[in-house]
Image: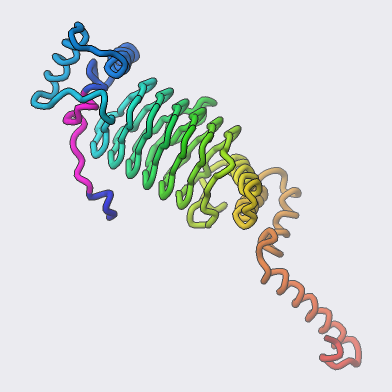
Amino acid sequence: MSEKDNTELKPAEENPWYVLATLYGENPDKNTLALNKDLWNKFFKHKLEGQPLAKEISERFYSRLSGQFLPNPQEGIDFSNTNFKERLNLMTFEFPKLAKFANSRFNRGLVLQAAKFDSDANFSNAKFFEHADFGMVEFTEEVIFYQSDFYTDGVLSDDGDVVCVRFDKAIFKGLCTFMDASFHRSSSFNNCQFVGPYNLSTAKFEKNYPVIESAGFHQKTTLSAKKEYWPSSQNCEQNPEEAKATCEILREQMEAQGLHEQAHFFFRREMHFARKTGPFWQAIPNCFFYFLSDFGYSILRPALGLLSCWITGALIYFGTTKLTFGGAM
């Protein structure tokens, strides 16, 4: 067990920021969610002293969490080290200050669709189960998902497919870090815009490649092009066409940065999936390419092939002429 698993988490109902964010209901329907969001945004945008809304906020807050002070809107927003048993829905919420979700556990998922972060956001060591929706979120400053774990089961994407982690149409204006993050199921970054540098160093995708169709990347994209971080063609649960498309995009990104070794890694994965798509006769050349040279990566395979051709020819000469074997060679 890692150190991050030993962190003692407090129940969500004891977190003052959670109480504030769910003041009109913890399992909100559409109308209740609108009330929660409206109150949350006004809490940061307006001076509420002396206004009727301020009294209502205080009464509702202390009825659920007596003995604690109402959060200070001038300080950072702290959802860290918290165990959320129910789904946390913060769709379209605005976060004007530093927002911390580090070391928290989202047992039934987190919804941040169309939320806006005007300051840094920290999701380090967070664990996401069942549902993780970051679609259309705007991150203005740095966002960190260092060592986060995505164990999610699935959510509908914009095109109707079920994906487990969704960042579709999200905008990352600052540095985005997924170092050492683990994606245990599928993830979608369709139409994402990485305006700032994007760091996927040592991030692990176990069963699926991220779907990154039409995504825009910063010129500095950091990836770990090693087999332990990406699913092989044998253990990949993804549609081969989809996996091939992702590998093609990642290859192009590495080539654009002049990282030829990394580019060739994704080229080999791209060709592996190409063998599984299209008619059988189209796969035959790719199979030969793989068998003879591991798609141009292996030196040993073509060397052994040339050696075997040489020896085979020498044996034919040796057996059909009066040449010695050395002469036949």
Q: Where is residue 4 in the image (x, y as percent from the top left)?
A: 28, 49
Above-or-below relation of 73 to 262: above
The boundaries of the magenta stretch are: 7-19
Above-or-below relation of 297 to 188: below
Indicate the quadrant where residue 153 lies: top left
Q: Is residue 206 at all visible to an observer of this figure? A: no
The residue shown at (51%, 35%) is 189
The residue shown at (40%, 24%) is 115
Q: How was the colour assigned to the protein in this rendering?
A: rainbow
The residue shown at (28%, 31%) is 76
Name the residue nearer the viewer: 258 or 46: 46
- Residue farthest toward the left in the current orientation of the protein: 67
Image quadrant containing the C terminus: bottom right
Q: Where is residue 215 in the image (x, y as percent from the top left)?
A: 57, 34
Q: Position of residue 133 (x, y in %)?
A: 41, 30
Above-or-below relation of 311 to 19: below
> Residue 28 vs residue 246: left or right?
left
Q: Position of residue 274 (x, y in %)?
A: 67, 48
> Residue 199 vs residue 309: left or right?
left
Above-or-below relation of 163 to 255: above
Image quadrant containing the N terminus: bottom left
Indicate the quadrant where residue 324 lies: bottom right
Residue 16 is covered by the magenta coloring: yes
